[in-house]
Amino acid sequence: MSSRHRFFLLPFALLASVLQCAQAAPQYVVIPLGNESTTQLRPAAINNLGQVIGVMRHEQGEELFLSSGGALRSLGWMGTSIPIDINDAGTMLYGDKLHFADGTTRALPLAAWAINNLGHATGEVENRRPVGPVTYAAIYGGGDALTLTGLADRWNTGWAINDADVAVGAVHGWIVGEPAGSPSFRAARFEGGRTQLLESLGNGYGAAYDINNQGFAVGFTAGHAALWTPEGRLIDLGAMLEAQFGDAAALGSAAYGINNAGEVVGRYGHEGGFLYSDGVMYDLRSLIADPDNLFVDAEGYDMAGGYDINDQHQIITRGIYGWGGLLSLASPPAAQPVPEPASCSLFGAGLLAIGLLKRRRQSGRPTA
Protein backbone atom coordinates (compact mmCIF):
# COMPACT_ATOMS: atom_id res chain seq x y z
CA MET A 1 0.00 0.00 0.00
CA SER A 2 1.33 3.46 -0.90
CA SER A 3 2.12 6.09 1.69
CA ARG A 4 -0.71 8.27 0.30
CA HIS A 5 -3.27 5.53 0.88
CA ARG A 6 -1.90 4.88 4.33
CA PHE A 7 -2.10 8.56 5.19
CA PHE A 8 -5.76 8.84 4.20
CA LEU A 9 -6.76 5.58 5.93
CA LEU A 10 -5.18 6.49 9.25
CA PRO A 11 -7.82 9.08 10.24
CA PHE A 12 -10.56 6.46 9.77
CA ALA A 13 -8.66 4.00 11.95
CA LEU A 14 -8.23 6.71 14.56
CA LEU A 15 -11.94 7.52 14.44
CA ALA A 16 -12.78 3.86 15.05
CA SER A 17 -10.40 3.81 18.00
CA VAL A 18 -11.94 6.96 19.47
CA LEU A 19 -15.45 5.54 19.10
CA GLN A 20 -14.39 2.31 20.76
CA CYS A 21 -12.81 4.19 23.67
CA ALA A 22 -15.90 6.36 24.01
CA GLN A 23 -18.04 3.21 24.44
CA ALA A 24 -15.65 1.56 26.86
CA ALA A 25 -17.17 2.66 30.17
CA PRO A 26 -20.37 0.81 31.15
CA GLN A 27 -23.24 2.85 32.57
CA TYR A 28 -25.27 1.76 35.60
CA VAL A 29 -28.67 2.76 36.93
CA VAL A 30 -30.03 2.47 40.45
CA ILE A 31 -32.53 -0.36 40.98
CA PRO A 32 -34.76 0.00 44.08
CA LEU A 33 -34.56 -2.89 46.52
CA GLY A 34 -38.04 -2.14 47.81
CA ASN A 35 -39.71 0.60 49.83
CA GLU A 36 -36.65 2.46 51.06
CA SER A 37 -38.37 5.62 52.26
CA THR A 38 -38.44 4.62 55.95
CA THR A 39 -35.53 2.17 56.14
CA GLN A 40 -31.80 2.15 55.52
CA LEU A 41 -30.57 -0.92 53.68
CA ARG A 42 -27.22 -2.65 53.86
CA PRO A 43 -27.10 -5.29 51.08
CA ALA A 44 -24.68 -8.13 51.71
CA ALA A 45 -24.96 -10.68 48.87
CA ILE A 46 -26.64 -11.04 45.47
CA ASN A 47 -27.39 -14.12 43.36
CA ASN A 48 -27.69 -14.41 39.57
CA LEU A 49 -31.46 -13.85 39.72
CA GLY A 50 -30.90 -10.41 41.24
CA GLN A 51 -32.14 -11.44 44.68
CA VAL A 52 -30.39 -9.54 47.44
CA ILE A 53 -30.03 -10.46 51.10
CA GLY A 54 -28.89 -7.94 53.66
CA VAL A 55 -29.71 -5.92 56.75
CA MET A 56 -32.31 -3.18 57.13
CA ARG A 57 -32.37 -0.61 59.86
CA HIS A 58 -35.57 0.91 61.23
CA GLU A 59 -36.96 2.34 64.45
CA GLN A 60 -37.29 -1.08 66.07
CA GLY A 61 -33.70 -2.08 65.37
CA GLU A 62 -31.95 -4.11 62.67
CA GLU A 63 -33.11 -7.26 60.91
CA LEU A 64 -32.37 -9.31 57.82
CA PHE A 65 -34.22 -8.67 54.57
CA LEU A 66 -34.67 -10.33 51.19
CA SER A 67 -35.24 -8.19 48.10
CA SER A 68 -36.67 -10.03 45.09
CA GLY A 69 -38.26 -8.49 42.02
CA GLY A 70 -38.42 -5.09 43.67
CA ALA A 71 -40.32 -6.41 46.70
CA LEU A 72 -38.68 -6.18 50.11
CA ARG A 73 -39.57 -8.51 52.97
CA SER A 74 -38.24 -9.09 56.44
CA LEU A 75 -36.76 -12.47 57.28
CA GLY A 76 -37.70 -12.04 60.91
CA TRP A 77 -34.16 -12.40 62.18
CA MET A 78 -32.95 -9.58 64.37
CA GLY A 79 -29.32 -8.59 64.66
CA THR A 80 -26.54 -8.07 62.14
CA SER A 81 -23.40 -9.74 63.48
CA ILE A 82 -23.96 -12.99 61.57
CA PRO A 83 -22.73 -14.23 58.17
CA ILE A 84 -25.42 -14.13 55.46
CA ASP A 85 -25.47 -15.39 51.86
CA ILE A 86 -27.86 -16.50 49.08
CA ASN A 87 -27.42 -18.86 46.10
CA ASP A 88 -29.12 -19.09 42.69
CA ALA A 89 -31.81 -21.46 44.00
CA GLY A 90 -32.85 -18.80 46.49
CA THR A 91 -31.44 -20.81 49.40
CA MET A 92 -30.29 -18.41 52.10
CA LEU A 93 -27.65 -18.87 54.76
CA TYR A 94 -27.96 -17.21 58.15
CA GLY A 95 -27.83 -18.34 61.75
CA ASP A 96 -25.75 -21.42 60.71
CA LYS A 97 -28.77 -22.81 58.87
CA LEU A 98 -29.84 -23.19 55.27
CA HIS A 99 -33.20 -21.53 54.68
CA PHE A 100 -34.82 -22.97 51.56
CA ALA A 101 -37.26 -21.19 49.27
CA ASP A 102 -40.09 -23.52 50.38
CA GLY A 103 -39.72 -22.34 53.98
CA THR A 104 -37.87 -25.39 55.34
CA THR A 105 -34.51 -25.17 57.08
CA ARG A 106 -31.46 -27.34 57.73
CA ALA A 107 -28.97 -26.86 60.55
CA LEU A 108 -25.33 -26.96 59.48
CA PRO A 109 -22.49 -28.75 61.31
CA LEU A 110 -20.19 -25.71 61.14
CA ALA A 111 -20.10 -22.00 61.80
CA ALA A 112 -20.95 -21.11 58.22
CA TRP A 113 -20.01 -18.04 56.21
CA ALA A 114 -21.06 -18.77 52.62
CA ILE A 115 -22.90 -21.23 50.36
CA ASN A 116 -22.53 -22.22 46.71
CA ASN A 117 -25.12 -23.20 44.10
CA LEU A 118 -24.94 -26.85 45.21
CA GLY A 119 -26.10 -25.88 48.68
CA HIS A 120 -22.63 -26.63 50.09
CA ALA A 121 -21.17 -24.30 52.69
CA THR A 122 -17.85 -23.15 54.09
CA GLY A 123 -16.86 -21.72 57.44
CA GLU A 124 -15.03 -23.08 60.45
CA VAL A 125 -15.21 -25.83 63.07
CA GLU A 126 -13.64 -25.62 66.52
CA ASN A 127 -10.96 -28.21 67.25
CA ARG A 128 -11.64 -29.78 70.66
CA ARG A 129 -8.40 -31.75 70.68
CA PRO A 130 -5.13 -30.46 72.19
CA VAL A 131 -3.27 -30.78 68.87
CA GLY A 132 -3.84 -29.46 65.35
CA PRO A 133 -5.53 -26.22 64.27
CA VAL A 134 -7.35 -24.09 66.81
CA THR A 135 -10.19 -23.97 64.29
CA TYR A 136 -10.46 -25.92 61.05
CA ALA A 137 -11.53 -24.35 57.79
CA ALA A 138 -14.54 -26.48 56.93
CA ILE A 139 -16.37 -27.35 53.71
CA TYR A 140 -19.81 -28.92 54.08
CA GLY A 141 -20.68 -31.05 51.05
CA GLY A 142 -24.21 -32.08 52.02
CA GLY A 143 -25.42 -34.98 54.13
CA ASP A 144 -22.63 -36.08 56.46
CA ALA A 145 -19.81 -34.80 54.22
CA LEU A 146 -17.57 -32.39 56.09
CA THR A 147 -13.99 -31.70 54.94
CA LEU A 148 -11.68 -30.13 57.51
CA THR A 149 -8.34 -28.52 56.81
CA GLY A 150 -5.99 -25.89 58.16
CA LEU A 151 -2.56 -25.12 59.53
CA ALA A 152 -1.65 -26.39 63.00
CA ASP A 153 -1.98 -24.03 65.98
CA ARG A 154 -3.82 -21.48 63.83
CA TRP A 155 -7.38 -20.26 63.38
CA ASN A 156 -8.50 -21.26 59.88
CA THR A 157 -11.70 -19.88 58.33
CA GLY A 158 -13.40 -20.28 54.96
CA TRP A 159 -15.23 -17.09 53.90
CA ALA A 160 -16.32 -17.94 50.35
CA ILE A 161 -16.87 -21.08 48.28
CA ASN A 162 -17.31 -21.73 44.55
CA ASP A 163 -19.29 -24.45 42.79
CA ALA A 164 -16.23 -26.73 42.68
CA ASP A 165 -16.13 -26.72 46.52
CA VAL A 166 -12.95 -24.63 46.60
CA ALA A 167 -13.00 -22.20 49.51
CA VAL A 168 -10.96 -19.12 50.33
CA GLY A 169 -10.60 -17.15 53.53
CA ALA A 170 -7.86 -16.58 56.06
CA VAL A 171 -5.39 -18.23 58.40
CA HIS A 172 -4.99 -16.37 61.71
CA GLY A 173 -1.93 -16.37 63.93
CA TRP A 174 1.82 -16.68 63.42
CA ILE A 175 2.56 -19.38 60.85
CA VAL A 176 5.19 -22.07 61.38
CA GLY A 177 8.10 -21.62 59.00
CA GLU A 178 7.48 -17.91 58.46
CA PRO A 179 10.12 -15.42 59.68
CA ALA A 180 9.67 -13.73 63.05
CA GLY A 181 7.47 -10.67 62.74
CA SER A 182 5.48 -12.14 59.85
CA PRO A 183 1.81 -11.14 59.62
CA SER A 184 -0.63 -13.06 61.76
CA PHE A 185 -3.46 -12.88 59.24
CA ARG A 186 -2.94 -14.38 55.77
CA ALA A 187 -5.18 -14.96 52.76
CA ALA A 188 -5.64 -18.68 52.16
CA ARG A 189 -7.24 -21.22 49.84
CA PHE A 190 -8.76 -24.50 51.07
CA GLU A 191 -9.33 -27.40 48.68
CA GLY A 192 -9.64 -31.15 49.17
CA GLY A 193 -8.18 -31.08 52.67
CA ARG A 194 -5.22 -28.92 51.62
CA THR A 195 -4.37 -25.38 52.73
CA GLN A 196 -2.51 -22.94 50.47
CA LEU A 197 -1.32 -19.51 51.57
CA LEU A 198 -1.91 -17.04 48.75
CA GLU A 199 0.90 -14.81 47.53
CA SER A 200 1.21 -11.69 49.67
CA LEU A 201 2.49 -8.17 49.27
CA GLY A 202 4.66 -6.18 51.64
CA ASN A 203 3.95 -7.29 55.20
CA GLY A 204 1.51 -9.88 53.82
CA TYR A 205 -1.35 -9.13 56.19
CA GLY A 206 -4.57 -9.97 54.36
CA ALA A 207 -7.57 -12.19 53.61
CA ALA A 208 -9.59 -13.54 50.68
CA TYR A 209 -13.28 -12.62 50.50
CA ASP A 210 -14.64 -14.24 47.31
CA ILE A 211 -13.81 -16.82 44.63
CA ASN A 212 -15.36 -17.53 41.22
CA ASN A 213 -15.85 -20.84 39.45
CA GLN A 214 -12.60 -20.41 37.51
CA GLY A 215 -10.68 -20.29 40.79
CA PHE A 216 -9.81 -16.58 40.79
CA ALA A 217 -10.05 -15.09 44.28
CA VAL A 218 -10.21 -11.52 45.58
CA GLY A 219 -9.50 -9.79 48.87
CA PHE A 220 -6.63 -7.69 50.17
CA THR A 221 -2.99 -7.94 51.16
CA ALA A 222 -0.90 -5.31 52.95
CA GLY A 223 -3.65 -2.73 52.52
CA HIS A 224 -3.96 -3.27 48.75
CA ALA A 225 -6.97 -4.71 46.92
CA ALA A 226 -5.88 -8.08 45.58
CA LEU A 227 -6.78 -10.54 42.83
CA TRP A 228 -5.27 -14.03 42.92
CA THR A 229 -4.96 -16.49 40.05
CA PRO A 230 -6.04 -20.13 40.52
CA GLU A 231 -2.37 -20.90 41.21
CA GLY A 232 -2.31 -18.37 44.04
CA ARG A 233 -0.27 -15.69 42.27
CA LEU A 234 -1.03 -12.09 43.19
CA ILE A 235 -2.34 -9.41 40.84
CA ASP A 236 -1.97 -6.11 42.70
CA LEU A 237 -5.20 -4.19 42.09
CA GLY A 238 -4.11 -1.64 44.68
CA ALA A 239 -1.19 -0.62 42.47
CA MET A 240 -3.61 -0.12 39.55
CA LEU A 241 -5.84 2.04 41.74
CA GLU A 242 -2.80 4.06 42.78
CA ALA A 243 -1.68 4.58 39.19
CA GLN A 244 -5.13 5.72 38.09
CA PHE A 245 -6.54 7.61 41.06
CA GLY A 246 -3.49 8.83 42.98
CA ASP A 247 -1.11 7.70 45.69
CA ALA A 248 -3.75 7.50 48.42
CA ALA A 249 -6.11 5.30 46.39
CA ALA A 250 -4.51 1.99 47.34
CA LEU A 251 -4.46 2.74 51.05
CA GLY A 252 -7.04 0.56 52.77
CA SER A 253 -8.39 -0.75 49.46
CA ALA A 254 -10.00 -4.20 49.24
CA ALA A 255 -11.78 -6.32 46.65
CA TYR A 256 -14.98 -7.91 47.91
CA GLY A 257 -16.71 -9.58 44.96
CA ILE A 258 -15.87 -11.33 41.69
CA ASN A 259 -18.18 -12.89 39.10
CA ASN A 260 -17.55 -15.70 36.63
CA ALA A 261 -16.58 -13.18 33.93
CA GLY A 262 -13.71 -12.06 36.16
CA GLU A 263 -15.18 -8.64 36.96
CA VAL A 264 -14.14 -7.41 40.40
CA VAL A 265 -15.73 -4.83 42.69
CA GLY A 266 -14.40 -3.26 45.87
CA ARG A 267 -13.52 -0.03 47.60
CA TYR A 268 -10.55 2.32 47.75
CA GLY A 269 -9.48 5.46 49.55
CA HIS A 270 -11.89 6.95 52.09
CA GLU A 271 -15.22 6.42 50.33
CA GLY A 272 -14.44 5.35 46.77
CA GLY A 273 -15.58 2.22 44.98
CA PHE A 274 -14.15 0.49 41.93
CA LEU A 275 -15.06 -1.89 39.12
CA TYR A 276 -12.21 -3.83 37.47
CA SER A 277 -13.36 -5.27 34.14
CA ASP A 278 -11.34 -6.76 31.28
CA GLY A 279 -8.12 -5.17 32.48
CA VAL A 280 -9.63 -1.69 32.92
CA MET A 281 -10.06 0.02 36.30
CA TYR A 282 -13.10 2.28 36.79
CA ASP A 283 -14.26 4.53 39.60
CA LEU A 284 -17.67 3.03 40.41
CA ARG A 285 -19.44 6.29 41.14
CA SER A 286 -18.45 7.70 37.74
CA LEU A 287 -20.34 4.87 36.02
CA ILE A 288 -23.67 5.66 37.66
CA ALA A 289 -26.12 7.70 35.60
CA ASP A 290 -27.70 9.39 38.65
CA PRO A 291 -25.42 8.81 41.66
CA ASP A 292 -27.19 11.34 43.89
CA ASN A 293 -30.30 9.17 43.71
CA LEU A 294 -28.58 6.61 45.93
CA PHE A 295 -25.19 7.64 47.14
CA VAL A 296 -25.91 10.27 49.77
CA ASP A 297 -27.45 9.04 53.01
CA ALA A 298 -29.40 10.94 55.64
CA GLU A 299 -26.18 12.20 57.23
CA GLY A 300 -24.83 13.38 53.87
CA TYR A 301 -22.13 10.72 53.49
CA ASP A 302 -21.15 9.61 50.03
CA MET A 303 -21.63 5.96 49.07
CA ALA A 304 -19.65 4.19 46.39
CA GLY A 305 -18.01 0.92 47.53
CA GLY A 306 -18.85 -2.27 45.59
CA TYR A 307 -19.39 -5.39 47.73
CA ASP A 308 -20.68 -8.10 45.37
CA ILE A 309 -21.29 -8.60 41.64
CA ASN A 310 -23.27 -11.31 39.85
CA ASP A 311 -23.00 -12.80 36.37
CA GLN A 312 -25.63 -10.33 35.12
CA HIS A 313 -23.17 -7.52 36.01
CA GLN A 314 -25.41 -6.27 38.83
CA ILE A 315 -23.51 -4.73 41.75
CA ILE A 316 -24.48 -4.24 45.35
CA THR A 317 -22.91 -1.21 46.90
CA ARG A 318 -22.45 0.33 50.32
CA GLY A 319 -20.85 3.46 51.67
CA ILE A 320 -18.83 4.53 54.67
CA TYR A 321 -21.62 3.60 57.10
CA GLY A 322 -22.81 0.57 55.14
CA TRP A 323 -26.01 1.87 53.56
CA GLY A 324 -26.46 1.33 49.86
CA GLY A 325 -28.38 -0.45 47.13
CA LEU A 326 -28.30 -2.26 43.79
CA LEU A 327 -26.80 -1.12 40.48
CA SER A 328 -27.75 -2.61 37.12
CA LEU A 329 -26.37 -2.00 33.64
CA ALA A 330 -28.29 0.66 31.73
CA SER A 331 -27.86 -1.36 28.50
CA PRO A 332 -27.02 -5.01 27.70
CA PRO A 333 -23.28 -5.78 28.02
CA ALA A 334 -22.98 -6.31 24.23
CA ALA A 335 -23.90 -2.66 23.68
CA GLN A 336 -21.13 -1.47 25.96
CA PRO A 337 -17.92 -3.31 25.11
CA VAL A 338 -14.97 -3.05 27.44
CA PRO A 339 -11.82 -2.92 25.26
CA GLU A 340 -8.36 -4.03 26.16
CA PRO A 341 -6.22 -1.12 27.44
CA ALA A 342 -4.25 -1.28 24.16
CA SER A 343 -7.35 -0.27 22.17
CA CYS A 344 -7.46 3.23 23.59
CA SER A 345 -3.71 3.60 23.19
CA LEU A 346 -4.21 3.28 19.41
CA PHE A 347 -5.39 6.87 19.40
CA GLY A 348 -2.06 8.19 20.66
CA ALA A 349 -0.12 5.80 18.43
CA GLY A 350 -2.13 6.93 15.42
CA LEU A 351 -1.44 10.58 16.10
CA LEU A 352 2.26 9.81 16.28
CA ALA A 353 2.09 7.87 13.01
CA ILE A 354 0.38 10.77 11.23
CA GLY A 355 3.05 13.15 12.46
CA LEU A 356 5.84 10.88 11.25
CA LEU A 357 4.24 10.38 7.83
CA LYS A 358 3.72 14.12 7.38
CA ARG A 359 7.31 14.82 8.34
CA ARG A 360 8.62 12.21 5.90
CA ARG A 361 6.51 13.60 3.05
CA GLN A 362 7.80 17.10 3.72
CA SER A 363 11.41 15.85 3.77
CA GLY A 364 10.99 13.83 0.58
CA ARG A 365 11.88 10.50 2.28
CA PRO A 366 10.13 7.32 1.08
CA THR A 367 7.43 5.93 3.41
CA ALA A 368 6.65 2.63 1.65
Image (spheres, rainbow, N blue to C red):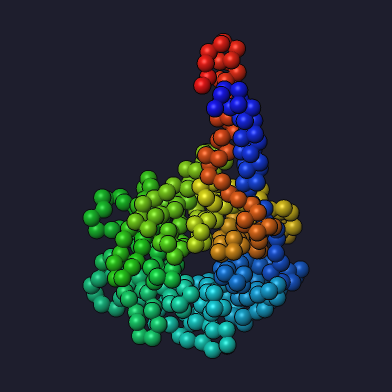
Residue sitting at x 65%, y 79%: 74
Residue at the extreme front: 1
Left/right placement of residue 233 relative to residue 43 reads left
Give the side of residue 321 with respect to residue 104, left or right: right
Residue that extends furthest to the right in the rendered view of this protein: 37
Check the image and report above or below for 177 versus 105: above
Q: Residue at x 55, y 40 (%)?
A: 343
Does residue 265 show up?
yes
In the displayed structure, 117 sits above or below 340; it is below
Name the side, left or right, on which 78 lies relative to 224: right
Residue appearing at x 65%, y 75% in the figure: 68
Quadrant containing the N terminus in the rendered view: top right
Residue 176, x across and y down, in percent: 24, 58
Query: Is residue 351 visible in this depiction of the protein?
Result: no
- State the residue at coordinates (60%, 78%): 78
Instruction: In this rendered view, identify the residue nearer to me: 3 or 228.
Output: 3
Q: Nearer the viewer, residue 41 or 3?
A: 3
How many discs appear? 0
Residue 9: x percent and y percent? 62, 30
Residue 35 versus residue 202 in the image, above or below: below
- Residue 141 occupies quadrant: bottom left
Residue 166 spot, x, y in % from top left: 38, 68
- Quick check: 142 above or below 152? below
Measuring from the top left, give residue 125's x and y in whole percent: 36, 76
